[in-house]
Amino acid sequence: MKKIIALALALVMSVAVFAGCGSNGAKENKTAEKEKITFVLDWTPNTNHTGLYVAQDKGYFDEAGLEVNIVQPPEDGAEALVGSGKAQFCVSFQDSMIPAITGKNALPLEAVAAVLQHNTSGIISRKGEGMDRPKGLEGKKYATWDLPIEKATLKQVVEDDKGDFSKVKLIPSTVTDEVSALKSKSVDAIWIFYGWAGVAAEQAKLDTDYFAFRDINPVFDYYTPVILGNTDWMKENPETAKKFLSAVKKGYEYAIDNSSEAADILCKAAPELDKELVKASQEYMTKQYIADAKSWGYIDPARWNAFYEWINENKLCDETLKKDMGFTNEYLEK
């Protein structure tokens, strides 16, 4: 009888331990499950995106309980993928996002963070040919994408400099390499983002002139690039959105303090990139991610609205862009 009782007790204890182990395992698996987020780039990987790759490499997303998949944009654009709910976030720009958030087919999108605090774009040209100021574009070949906002911006800065925009020779842009295009003289002036193409010109030892749009007219100090999020998804998952942006913020802050290491992380994620260009570009970007803002990602409503008011004044959108339309600081760390 004692042997039978002992055997029964042992059996009960074994079952209990096994059940307990199963329960703990299930709990651990549940805890280990990460919330999945798809992030869409605007183009191939570059130093605009470094903070994302740092957050992934250093485990900041993991710490936040997130599994983030960084993907290339589809042919119809990153905004369409996020707006349809097939991805949660993407890189975009305050100017080019306008068609996505207006009209009868407007998508549920909002800018939730500024990747760079100021507009670093402008016009680059060969040095000493008079294009160091907008008026100097008269009679010169400018490579245009033939976009309404692009041409209106160029017209504004040329006229602000007392120039005649009708004298600028607009030629269709086929530029894929700004340095080669300038050296070959197939074009005289190109709109670039200095942190990549401008630095590339420096690396190539090409002497250039350059002027930034925001230096000519403060209205052009708009936000480019930005991170867009799906508005509906963020409203349903506000804490996840905040965790994501907090991890991304840590990634960009790391890149600011560790330029060389951050460049290595980007190159590891995208080994096809020119390492020397990435290193030099990353050094430039360390001063641009936050600049004079109170923290990374913050969008100044006054600057955002000023640019959209300019869009309204120049009738560059079929509908009036309302105050504070298209952005929020709600999901950033306070």
Image (cartoon, rainbow, N blue to C red):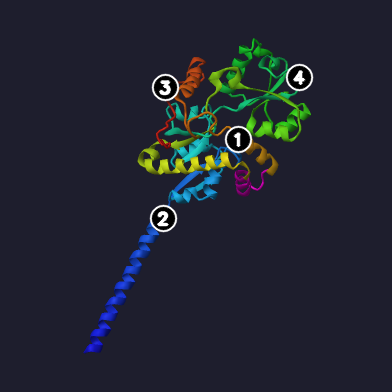
310 horizontally vs 125: left or right: left
Q: CA distance from mark 4 to mark 3?
A: 41 Å
Q: Does dot 2 land on a helix, a strand or a loop?
A: loop
Residue 274 in view of the camera: no
Q: How many marks?
A: 4
**Residue shown at 40%/44% (left/top)?**
240
Extent of the magenta region: 261-274
Name the secondary structure under disc 3: loop
Q: Is residue 283 visible?
A: yes
Query: Which circle's residue, 4 or 1, is located before the other in the chain?
Result: 4
Residue 206: name its quadrant: top right
Q: Nearer the viewer, residue 152 or 291?
A: 291
Q: Amino acid at mark 1?
A: Met
For mark 1, what is the residue? 285
Q: CA distance from mark 1 to mark 2?
A: 35 Å
What residue type is disc 3 on? Lys
- According to the picture, the residue beneath numbered tag 4 turns out to be 129
Q: Which residue is mark 2?
A: 33
Decide whether the magenta segment is chiefly helix, strand or loop: helix
Residue drawn where x is 49% and y is 37% of the image: 80
Q: CA distance from mark 1 to mark 3?
A: 30 Å
Which badge, 3 or 2, is on the more N-terminal residue? 2
Which residue is the extreme one toward the left? 1
- The residue indicated by pointer 3 is 323
